[in-house]
Amino acid sequence: MKILAIMGSPRKNGNTYKLTRRVEEKMKQLGDVDFEYLFLKDLDLRPCLGCGACFTKGEDHCPHKDDRAMLEEKMHQADGVIFASPVYVFNVSGLMKNFFDRFAYVCHRPRFFKSALMLATAGFELGTGQMLKSFSFMAEVWGFTVAHSFAIAANDVLEFGTRADKAEKKIATAATKFFRAAASGRVKPGLVNMAVFLAAQPSIRKLSAEYYDYHYWRDHGLA
Ligand SMILES: Cc1cc2nc3c(=O)[nH]c(=O)nc-3n(C[C@H](O)[C@H](O)[C@H](O)COP(=O)(O)O)c2cc1C
């Protein structure tokens, strides 16, 4: 099974990486798993220009010719995707937000019907609930079914925290749930997946044929 981990910290060997490696170790105890790490900090993924060409004409019309298409292909090839980010000011890091902005067209044309694990590290657990909610929502709007989401305070990841046992349990639960979901290959659309799809469908049906979304939804039997 192939797992892709998309890393949103500017610190390559930071807490978020250490936590993801712990999830990897646990998953490898459960079965045959290949991990690939993509560090957003090392990729050429420029900030969105806001031209809207990806929405109206299609993503191939994005003026940036960078690593976006490669990233999308990697997500298609994986059996499951881990999105990992530090909590920055009660939300995902800027690197992670830019990544989601560059794939905004997927909110209009969902395609990743597979399992995701949302993982965060924080200084404190304060504000992590709302961060995980919006983090998970982004992936769900793209079509992912979120098998699990969790945050851990940095001290716990580094093993000198007072709540290391609790952290260990959280890591084991996340690894088991995500392993099972990704290995089964079956994804049951969740409430957010269905709500977004049903809310978008009537508007897409009314679109004129000059919009790329019109063709995508019809070509994929969605409209
Ligand atoms: C700019 C910045 C903003 C942060 N904002 C928060 C925050 O809102 N809440 C929190 O609990 N921790 C916050 N932190 C702490 C980080 O989330 C925490 O140290 C995290 O584990 C860093 O991950 P990394 O080592 O992978 O970079 C912030 C850190 C930085 C540098």
Image (cartoon, rainbow, N blue to C red):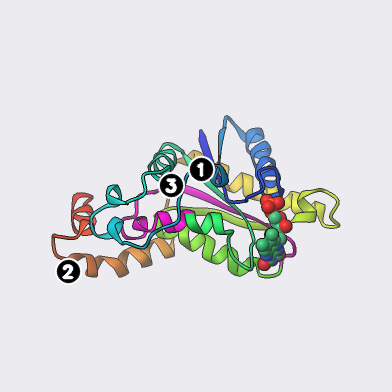
Judging by the rendered image, the residue that carries numbered circle 2 is: 206
Determine the CA span between mark 2 and mark 1.
Answer: 38 Å
Q: Amino acid at mark 3?
A: Lys
Is tag 2's residue or tag 1's residue first in the polypeptide sequence?
Answer: 1
**How many residues crowd around disc 3 within 10 Å: few (fewer than 14), some, or many (20 or more)?**
many
Is tag 2's residue or tag 3's residue first in the polypeptide sequence?
Answer: 3
Is residue 166 shown to the viewer in this render?
A: no
Judging by the rendered image, the residue that carries numbered circle 3 is: 114
77 or 46: nearer the viewer:
46
Cβ atoms at labels 2 and 3 below 8 Å apart: no
Q: Determine which of the numbered discs, if any, sits on residue 43 in the image.
A: 1
30 or 78: nearer the viewer:
78
Residue shown at the point (55%, 66%) measured from the top left:
133
Give the SS element for disc 2.
helix
The spot of residue 95 in percent (x, y) is 55, 54
Q: Quadrant of residue 53?
A: bottom left
Query: Closer to the observer: label 1 or label 3?
Result: 1
State whether residue 158 is above or below residue 194: above
The spot of residue 97 in percent (x, y) is 51, 59
Give the SS element for disc 3.
loop
Q: Report the side of 143 relative to 148 (left or right).
A: left
Point out the quarter of the image occupied by ligand 1.
Answer: bottom right
The spot of residue 208 in percent (x, y) is 14, 65
Determine the CA span between mark 1 and mark 3.
Answer: 23 Å
Residue shown at the point (52%, 65%) measured from the top left:
134
Q: Residue furthest left?
A: 209
93 or 125: nearer the viewer:
93
Residue span colored magenta? 99-125
Query: Closer to the observer: label 2 or label 3?
Result: 2
